[in-house]
């Protein structure tokens, strides 16, 4: 009887401790486990950032492998440009932006040179989020080096974000624009493209960037509710953990409404934030998030064993 009571107490305390820990730090826990798994096996269940021998950023994607992701390289280049007061970051920005320039192909865009079979994409394929980030990074390099040729490359990439080119955006009859990633209606890719367009316009003062940004914001305002209902709020091809993905999306939307305030979009964002604050056990069951449930169960069992062993210690 005492053994059963001890086990029940251990299970109860373990559940409470796991729930509190997962509520506060689930994304960090999942990331740490995923990175440890990648370090040992060179595979993982989440996306893992890494670098090649020259320090160029790469990314491990589940069921794809470790590949160069131009969007990831571009975002790192932009980050180092924005903090280039430190000499090593200036050098890093120049290295990464040069790598991007060297990746521009005959279309004037930068391809994703890997097969992404989960999304039925074979190399080379193109993403609006990648082109907008690369466009901004190359424009920053052009300004830094005072190089008009580089500015021409970045403005060419901007032009191909216009729906008239038919590559990576589509227009509606009401003159709104959706910027395509994978899948075509991925909200994260759309929002990131809008943020990049805004920063490009601030840097270059380009009327096309301003126009595409305004049309894209209107499209997002119209489409967000229906896309959420169709399941596009969760990107099926993004593997950083469901809750981390949700937090990343709300962070990007927060950035967007700071530069393009919208009362209805702000209400949606507040609702998304409230969803993240719900008890994690409810979130997991509501989303049928079997991976999240499995990891939490492992944590619960581990804490239960430790607590049970402590309770069994002779007094």
Image (cartoon, helix red, strand yellow):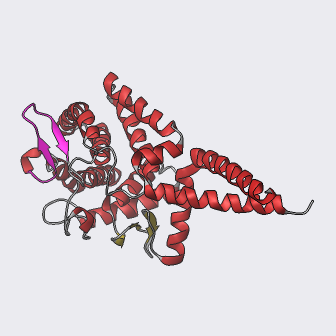
Q: How many marks can you see? A: 0
The residue drawn where x is 51% and y is 37% is: 278
Along the viewing direction, whichever of 38 and 203 lies nearer the viewer: 38
Which image quarter is the C terminus in? bottom right
Asked if residue 178 is among those painted magenta in the image, a careful observer would answer yes
Q: Is residue 69 left or right of residue 295?
A: left
Along the viewing direction, whichever of 251 and 78 lies nearer the viewer: 251
The residue drawn where x is 32% and y is 66% is: 99
Q: Is residue 191 left or right of residue 149?
A: right
Q: Which residue lies furthest to the front in this view?
A: 1
Q: Can residue 220 be seen in this view?
A: no
Q: Is residue 205 visible?
A: yes
The percent position of residue 158, horizontal first and vertical second, equals: 19, 48
- Give the magenta range: 166-179
- Quarter holding residue 238: bottom left
The residue drawn where x is 45% and y is 55% is: 241
Give above or below for 85 relative to 70.
above
The percent position of residue 224, horizontal first and vertical second, equals: 26, 35
The residue drawn where x is 24% and y is 42% is: 230
Q: Which residue lies furthest to the right in this view?
A: 315
Asked if residue 177 is among those painted magenta in the image, a careful observer would answer yes
The percent position of residue 64, horizontal first and vertical second, equals: 33, 71
């Amino acid at each position: 009887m005492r053994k059963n009571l001890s086990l029940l107490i251990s299970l109860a305390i373990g559940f409470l401790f796991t729930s509190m820990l997962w509520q506060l730090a689930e994304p960090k826990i999942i990331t740490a486990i995923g990175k440890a798994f990648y370090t040992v096996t060179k595979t993982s269940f989440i996306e893992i950032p890494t670098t090649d021998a020259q320090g160029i950023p790469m990314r491990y994607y589940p069921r794809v492998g470790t590949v160069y992701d131009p969007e990831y390289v571009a975002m790192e280049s932009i980050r180092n440009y924005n903090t280039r007061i430190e000499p090593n970051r200036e050098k890093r920005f120049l290295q990464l932006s040069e790598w991007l320039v060297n990746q521009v192909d005959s279309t004037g865009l930068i391809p994703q040179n890997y097969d992404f079979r989960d999304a039925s994409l074979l190399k080379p394929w193109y993403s609006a989020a990648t082109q907008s980030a690369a466009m901004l990074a190359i424009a920053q390099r052009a300004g830094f080096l005072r190089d008009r040729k580089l500015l021409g490359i970045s403005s060419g990439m901007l032009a191909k974000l216009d729906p008239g080119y038919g590559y990576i955006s589509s227009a509606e009859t009401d003159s709104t624009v959706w910027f395509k990633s994978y899948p075509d209606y991925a909200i994260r890719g759309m929002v990131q493209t809008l943020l990049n367009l805004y920063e490009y316009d601030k840097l270059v003062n380009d009327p096309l960037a301003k126009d595409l940004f305004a049309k894209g914001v209107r499209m997002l305002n119209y489409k967000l509710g229906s896309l959420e209902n169709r399941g596009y709020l969760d990107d099926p091809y993004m593997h950083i953990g469901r809750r981390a993905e949700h937090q990343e999306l709300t962070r990007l939307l927060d950035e967007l409404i700071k530069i393009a305030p919208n009362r209805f979009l702000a209400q949606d964002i507040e609702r998304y934030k409230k969803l993240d604050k719900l008890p994690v056990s409810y979130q997991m069951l509501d989303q049928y998030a079997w991976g999240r449930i499995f990891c939490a169960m492992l944590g619960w069992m581990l804490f239960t064993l430790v607590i049970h062993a402590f309770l069994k210690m002779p007094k």
